[in-house]
Image (cartoon, rainbow, N blue to C red):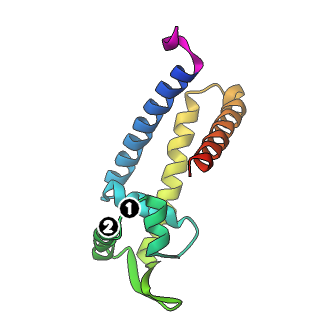
Amino acid sequence: MYKNSTASRLANLTFSLLANCQEKEVHLAKLHRLTQAEFRCLRLFGTDESLNNKTIAERMNLSPSRLTRINDGLVKKRYIRREIDPNDRRNMRVNLSKKGKSLVQQLNKDYVDIHKEILQDINPSQHEQLIMAMTHLLEALEKWLKKTE
């Protein structure tokens, strides 16, 4: 009886979805000669050109030392620059270089293009329902996470 429950099916689906999304990230990272962690770090920038280490570490759920190693790789590849945060000298600001801005724009485009491909395998009449269902799932998950804090 439990195996057929909605909660059990949702648990299995979200587990598989997470695993497949991670594989999607690995694929995109490899295309751009990045580690998955470097890819995720760069994706955090979105339209921002500058973030501080504390923000990046919190969003990626990383220790400062792990983030330093990721940033070292991105500095070496000349995608980011680091400087002392003028508002808090204990913290570093991470800025996208010109090369980094270009890469982030390409990563964002490639990320959307992958999702366009994925949507081609889903009947267009179901696209809006899919987006709405995923939006509701995300909202419920975020609500649950707030309760657990």
Q: What residue sits 42% from the left and 82% below the top?
A: 92
Disc 1 residue type (three-letter): Leu
Question: Is 10 situated above or below 141?
Answer: above
Examine the structure image and report whether residue 79 is included in the region drawn in magenta. Answer: no
Label 2 to label 1, Cα distance in Å? 10 Å
Q: Check disc 2 and give the amino acid type.
A: Ile
Label 2 vs label 1, nearer the camera? 1
Can residue 103 be seen here? The reply is no
Label disc, if present, on residue 135 of the rendered structure: none
Residue in the picture at 31% in, 52% down: 30
Left or right? Give the position of 47 relative to 110.
right
Q: Identify the residue under disc 1.
A: 62
Residue 98, placed above or below residue 11: below
Q: Which residues are magenta?
A: 1-6
Which quarter of the picture shows residue 91? bottom left
Query: Viewer-proximal residue, 21 or 7?
Result: 7
Residue 70: image tag:
2
Give me the residue at 36% from left, 53% from top.
29
- Above/below status of 123 relative to 138: above
Contact check, label 2 and label 1, Cβ < 8 Å: yes
> Which residue corresponds to the image point at 53% horizontal and 55% vertical from the top-left?
109
- Residue 128: x and y in percent read 72, 34
